[in-house]
Amino acid sequence: MILLEFSMSPMDKGESVSDQVSRSLKIIDESGVPYKLNPMGTVLEGEFDEVMGVVKQCYETMRSDCKRITCGIKIDYREGKSGRLESKMASIENKLRLSRRKIRKTGI
């Protein structure tokens, strides 16, 4: 299963690109692929071809009226694991709670 984080923006539309980015978010939402939006991009979860297909649709749509596009992609593959959009954050949050309890007990 893949976690893919990407950020795609036109470089020829001025300072505000929310119109173009919102078109991508519509594609992502309608794809049915689990995702999380964050301030710097979007994380998708699925099989490689599935998540890359969503990125390609976003690119093709943006390309239709943008002459220059920038895109950054990070991929995290882990065999046999799904639901990592939620579980990775839950694991860290749980560890933070345990650390805080340990600090309170030891008085540090």
Image (spheres, rainbow, N blue to C red):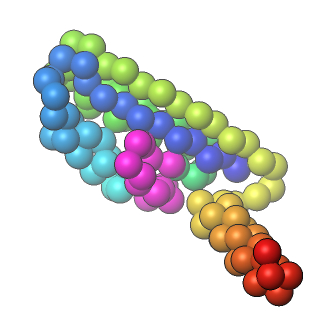
Q: In the picture, residue 69 is in which quadrant?
A: top left
Relative side of 41 to 14, left or right: right
| Residue 18 on the magenta span | no
Q: In the picture, residue 103 is in which quadrant?
A: bottom right
Horizontal and vertical percent for residue 105? 83, 86
Which residues make up the magenta segment?
31-43
Q: Toward the viewer: 1 or 20?
A: 20
Relative side of 77 to 89, left or right: right
Q: Is residue 23 visible?
A: no
List the single residue furthest toward the right. Answer: 106
Q: Toward the viewer: 26 or 97?
A: 97
List the single residue furthest toward the top. Answer: 67
Q: In the picture, residue 58 is in which quadrant?
A: top left
Q: From the viewer's perspective, is residue 21 above or below residue 79? A: above
Q: Quadrant of the C terminus?
A: bottom right
Q: From the viewer's perspective, is residue 53 above or below residue 26? A: above
List the single residue furthest toward the bottom. Answer: 105
Q: Toward the viewer: 16 or 23?
A: 16
Q: Is residue 6 visible?
A: yes
Q: From the viewer's perspective, is residue 42 above or below residue 95? A: above
Q: Residue at x 47, y 56 (%)?
A: 35
Q: Toward the viewer: 85 or 48?
A: 85
| Residue 40 on the magenta span | yes
Q: Residue at x 16, y 34 (%)?
A: 16
Relative side of 45 to 92, left or right: left
Q: Residue at x 14, y 24 (%)?
A: 14
Horizontal and vertical percent for residue 75? 63, 37
Q: Residue at x 57, y 42 (%)?
A: 4
Horizontal and vertical percent for residue 94? 72, 75
